[in-house]
Amino acid sequence: DTAVSQTPKYLVTQMGNDKSIKCEQNLGHDTMYWYKQDSKKFLKIMFSYNNKELIINETVPNRFSPKSPDKAHLNLHINSLELGDSAVYFCASSQGLEEKLFFGSGTQLSVL
Amino acid sequence: AQSVSQHNHHVILSEAASLELGCNYSYGGTVNLFWYVQYPGQHLQLLLKYFSGDPLVKGIKGFEAEFIKSKFSFNLRKPSVQWSDTAEYFCAAFLMDTGKLIFGQGTTLQVKP
């Protein structure tokens, strides 16, 4: 019944590895997002997709590549993980860009 | 630069005390404003929002916020907090011209029973 679900909840990995985080929403929303929350709790937009098309791409290293196979899914793939990538990554969805967001429970990524 | 500032990083109150959390945004265009809350162990969820109309908006659990355009502020208030209000509170502004939602850095509210 979870509206926005993301997996895994925790991800511990070594520097240099490649990892993916998956996100699915069952709300029928058109827009999905990835946010990064740093150690100071700042939530910063990384990407936004509308109907599978990229509409917002903040200044994120190109090691981060979002993929939206359909409008209910937005996965995040990260290549060559670095220590600074350690953070909590939140997936979210909304009916429109200006509407309220529904968040997933977050993925805590720790790069060792 | 466009930003959202929350002035209180960590607030500790006793039950029944009144709460006001400050939020200011720096942006000259049209904004939609939000307060989100994250209770311990739970995901972020909407507390209340302002799009237009009455600048005093009421949300869930007795919270309200007032949009003061001249001050670029959207402060969150509750007359009497409860222990269950212990959570992280995030102010956010949706910038209509850019289509981006910008969050403040969050305020940790701890309510002592």
Image: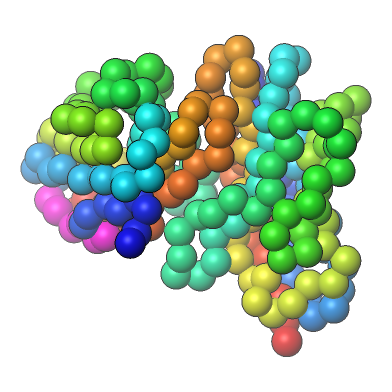
Name the residue furthest bottom. B113
Task: Give the color scheme: rainbow, by chain, secondary structure or one colour.
Answer: rainbow
Which residue does the image show at 34% across and 59% down from the upper left? A2
Name the residue furthest left. A17
| Left or right: where A16 falls relative to A30 | left
Indicate whether B91 appears above or below B38: above
Foreground residue, A111 or A89?
A89
Which residue does the image show at 69% across and 42% down from the upper left? B49
Quarter of the image with the N terminus of chain B is top right
| Left or right: where B98 falls relative to A69 | right
Which residue does the image show at 63% across and 38% down from the upper left? B92
Residue B2: x percent and y percent? 63, 22
| Left or right: where A8 falls relative to B92 | left
Foreground residue, B9 or A97?
A97
Foreground residue, B63 or A58?
B63
Can residue A2 be seen in this snapshot? yes
| Left or right: where A81 falls relative to B20 | left
Indicate whether A88 appears above or below B94: below
Q: Quadrant of residue A19?
A: top left
Q: Is residue A10 magenta?
A: yes
The main secondary structure of the magenta stretch is strand
Can residue A83 be seen in this snapshot? no
Foreground residue, A46 or A72?
A72
Residue A91: x percent and y percent? 36, 43
Residue B53: x percent and y percent? 83, 31
Q: Is residue B110 magenta?
A: no
Query: How many numbered marks appear?
Result: 0
In the image, which residues are magenta? Answer: A9-14
Quarter of the image with the C terminus of chain B is bottom right
Residue A86: x percent and y percent? 30, 48
